[in-house]
Image (tube, rainbow, N blue to C red):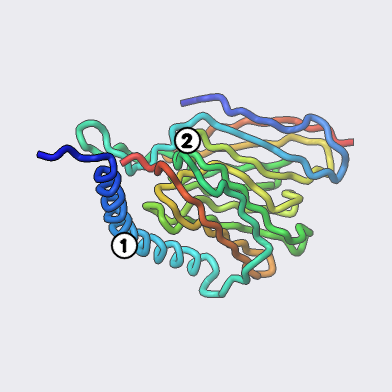
Amino acid sequence: MRQLSRRDALALGVSGAALTFIGSDERASAAAKEAADSIAQFTGGKTAEKGKVSIELPEIAENGNTVPLSVSVDAPMGADNYVSEVIIVADGNPNPGIATFHFSPLSGKAEASTRIRLAATQNIIAVAKTSKGEFFTNQKLVKVTIGGCGG
Amino acid sequence: MAEKPRLKLPTEAKKGEVIEIKTLLPHVMETGLRKDKDGKPIPRKIINKFVCEFNGKPVFTANLEPAVAANPYMQFRAKVEESGTFKFTWTDDDGTVTTADEKITVS
């Protein structure tokens, strides 16, 4: 039997990776639907306007077990008009929900950071709700090198 | 359980200042998706709720899902108008409640 050259081994690896990619793509679309569903539930069917929300995430997360995430909403935090809730969902995790932040006028600023788990490369979507019932959204793609969901 | 939470916030602030608060509670945040060596699923055990109050009024609340990493870290802001006490509460899936509080002097 011919020994596998380095080039062959590389080619095998690439086609293998491509195959897994197709497999994960199907799963990803199911997760994306779940994510969209949970957003629709949050907004009550209203369309969230894009903008005002900013998401800070590393472009490439080497370890999906702990990925720093920051969300802030550029909106006033007055007593009668403030950002009351922000939901964070992922479209490629086993479950779409990540966290829901509830703010109050005492928050001063609608901004929070935490560390999250990501199973694969995916979009993180944040939707903010103001006390007046307006919705704002934004999303960010994060590439994950090693997924963080055990298994 | 009964791990001690870590808190980081100023002890003094000016009236109307928006301060930064950082908290961390050592906790496994078991997702419920992992399996043990025998292939049995490991039951979910996470901190599902974090609450921060100031003088009894809500400042910031977070509902957490298993997608929050182990040792849940939270960083957020608070606007202080008077001296008082921040109270932090973490609620575990099993009902365990961990609390901590910190005083702040506002001038």
Compared across the picture, whether B107 is left or right of A100 comes to: right
Residue farthest along the right direction in this orientation: B107
Pointer 2 indicates a residue of which chain? B
Please give the name of the residue rendered at 47% of the width and 35% of the height, measured from the top-left corner. Answer: B70
The image quadrant of residue A2 is top left
Q: Which chain carries label 1?
A: A
Q: In which quadrant will I find the N terminus of chain A?
A: top left
Q: In this view, does B71 lie above or below A140?
A: above
Q: Dot 1, crowdedness within 10 Å: few (<14), some or many (≥20)?
A: few
Residue A45 is left or right of residue A131, and the answer is left
The amino acid type found where label 2 is placed reads: Ala
Residue visible at 64% across and 47% down in the picture = A112
Q: Which mark is residue A85?
A: none
Point out residue A127 in the picture as x, y percentages from the top left corner: 58, 62
The quarter of the image holding the C terminus of chain A is top left
| Residue A74, quarter of the rendered image | bottom right
Q: Which of A10 and A121 is in front in this view?
A: A10
Farthest residue, direction left:
A1
SS at mark 2 in the image: loop
When the figure is inspected, residue B43 is found, relative to residue A94, above or below; the finding is above
Question: What residue would you read off at disc 1?
Answer: A26
Q: Name the residue located 34 percent from the left edge and 60 percent from the top edge.
A: A25
- Cα gap from disc 2 to disc 1, whole angstroms: 28 Å
Residue in the image at 77% along x and 60% along y:
A76
The amino acid type, in three-letter code, at marker 1 is Glu
Coordinates of residue A18 in the picture (x, y in percent): 31, 55
> Residue B70: which disc?
2
Q: In front: mark 2 or mark 1?
A: 1
Q: In the depicted view, which residue is nearer to us: B15 or A4?
A: A4
Q: Do the residues labelled 2 and 1 touch (CB within 8 Å)?
A: no
Viewed as shown, does residue A30 lie left or right of B73? left
Q: Is mark 1 on a helix, strand or loop?
A: helix
